[in-house]
Image (cartoon, helix red, strand yellow):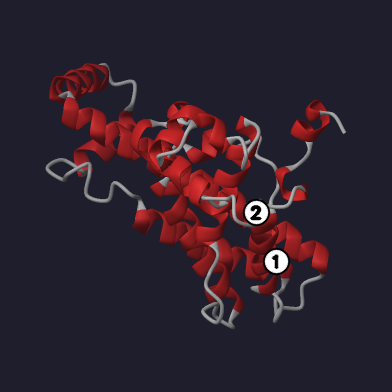
Amino acid sequence: MSSMEDDTNLIWLRPEPTGRRPRFTRERIARAALRIADDEGFDAVTMKRIAGELGAGTMTLYYYVRTKADIVALMQDTILEDILIPDGELPTAWKAAVAAISRRTRDVLIQHPWAISSLNQAQFGPNAMRHFEQSLAALKQTNLTPTQKAELTAILDDYVTGSATHTIETLERVRSATDNPQLVKDAQAYGEALFAGGSFPEIYKLSASLEGASLFVDVRRDSQFETGLAALLDGIERHYKIA
């Protein structure tokens, strides 16, 4: 088998190195890559940078992973491992179980703000399967068909990912405002000028009702997420006639 063919194989189809030679594990490599991405951004994740984080030579790292795609796959699978509800802790009632998975997924995604946009091409790994299995298991007490369970899980994933994305954007705006207060003043002045023209009456009413309140009281949008999740689950229950 050629090296080119080796490199295109899924990392999950290759056994992890064992025996006396290995100094590292795939999980340790993945955790190092996540630390780099969290601290410096996804683009900073390179073989050389990971090797430095682990105190190893770059060529040593190639004994464990062969391509950037391998690294990306390990990073995503490690994130999905953190998303899993620990054994024995998943609630029995379907709404509580689904809500627990949704909250945990959103929290982990927010902890890694680069992940949603950077891991889209990651190889599907074992913890992705475990996450999907757990999501379906959360609905095992319902009268839903397997297809309906998969559909409902996809709907919830879309909601959670969307909420996490908007929260990450909000947190970034807060950081920008903190670093550049003049930008906030300029934005406020621009908004006031637009309101003066009378073209945005509904937005003006909302702004007036919030006058004096901090815009950053709930920068994580936790309350909004919980309201939306509750409404979504109630609607799902009625739509699917879940018993």
Percent position of residue 54, x then y: 42, 42
Where disc 2 sits, the SS reads helix
For residue 113, which quarter of the picture? top left
Q: Which residue lies under the disc numbered 2?
A: 155
Percent position of residue 134, x then y: 65, 68
Left or right: 23 with respect to 173?
right
154 vs 139: above or below: above
Q: Which mark is residue 238?
A: none
Q: In the rendered structure, which disc, 1 or 2, sits on the residue that comes first in sequence?
A: 1
Asked whether the viewer can see residue 16, the reply is: yes
Percent position of residue 206, x then y: 28, 39
Percent position of residue 154, x then y: 68, 54
Asked whether the viewer can see residue 119, the reply is: no
Depth order, front residue of 43/237: 43
Q: Residue at x 64, y 73 (%)?
A: 138
Q: Which residue lies under the disc numbered 1?
A: 133
Depth order, front residue of 201/163: 163
Residue kind at label 2, given as amino acid type: Ile
135 vs 119: above or below: below
Left or right: 57 with respect to 222?
right
Residue kind at label 1, given as amino acid type: Glu
Left or right: 142 with respect to 81?
right
Question: The N terminus appears in which quarter of the rendering?
Answer: top right
- Kindly indicate whether the residue at mark 2 contacts the one at mark 1 (C-beta within 8 angstroms): no
Q: Residues within 10 Å of mark 1 (few under 14, many from 20)?
A: few
Q: Residue furthest right?
A: 1
Question: The C terminus appears in which quarter of the rendering?
Answer: bottom right
Q: Residue at x 43, y 60 (%)?
A: 227
70 vs 129: above or below: above
For residue 151, which quarter of the picture? bottom right
